[in-house]
Amino acid sequence: MYCMWMNLVPQLKTGNLVVALTNQNVIISNLIAELALRGPAIVLDSGNCFPAYRIAQLIRRKSLQLESISRRIFIQRSFTCYQMTSLLENTPAVAQPHVILNLLTTFQDDQVKPDEAGRLLTICLSHIERLSLVAPVAITLEPAILAEKEFLLKRVCEQADEVFTSLSEPSPQEQQLSFFGM
């Protein structure tokens, strides 16, 4: 786990799109905290999963200036794939690292047909490429995806310069309990 996020940071270079296929929030937290310790960072949260408390803990371990370092993290959220598309269209290309959390989560909406999701993803990827020309961009992706929309995951990974994978089995606390022992 530690090695994976540490390997991500050096790969974050302007013009280099990095994808982390992971279901581990600790990796995301460590990445964002490390970027904030180095300077301003922009986080586009598509899965409403920004781990604020964990990031604050990690920053506090390395610095006494939690408040000023936390202010370096600029967060914007989207709750639909249409909002994510608009968010990326309107994000200015500035020379600060961009982390896009769970890009495809909002694309899982069963009200959005696969063709429409593909069209929107094409727009998103063009804006991600635009952002990567002036700043490092990292995208996190959840591995769980609807079968009819698996092609979206493949397209994002194909566009990436580097793909890191770190998946874990859910802990017993994360697994849903069954009343029937099944």
Image: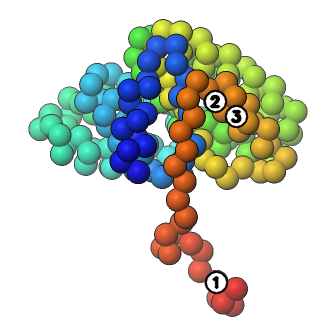
Q: Say which residue appears at 25% left-offset and 48% top-offset.
A: 57
Query: Does residue 52 sit above or below 174 in this rendering?
Result: above
State how the image is colored.
rainbow
Judging by the rendered image, the residue that carries numbered circle 1 is: 178
Task: Nearest to the eye among marks 1 and 2: give it.
Answer: 1
Q: Is residue 10 left or right of residue 86?
A: left
Residue 83 in the image: state x and y as whole percent: 65, 30
Judging by the rendered image, the residue that carries numbered circle 3 is: 81
Identify which amino acid the numbered label 1 is placed on: Ser
Outermost residue on the bottom side: it is: 180
Q: Say which residue appears at 79% left-offset and 38% top-offset.
A: 151
- Contact (CB < 8 A) between labels 1 and 2? no
Q: Taking the image as drawn, is residue 46 in sight?
A: no
Task: Compute the Cα span from label 1 to label 3.
Answer: 32 Å
Task: Please tell me how crowded label 3 is: few (under 14), some (14-19), or many (20+) other residues with Cα within 10 Å.
Answer: many
Residue 8 in the image: state x and y as whole percent: 43, 33
Identify which amino acid the numbered label 3 is placed on: Cys
Residue 94 location, quadrant: top left
Q: Say which residue appears at 59% left-offset and 80% top-offset.
A: 177
Task: Compute the Cα span from label 3 to label 2.
Answer: 5 Å
- Residue 31, which numbered label? none
Task: Compute the Cα span from label 1 to label 2.
Answer: 35 Å
Residue 2 in the image: state x and y as whole percent: 36, 48
Query: Does residue 57 sit above or below 76 in this rendering?
Result: below
Q: Is residue 32 left or right of residue 109?
A: left
Quadrant location of the C terminus?
A: bottom right
- Residue 84, which numbered label? 2
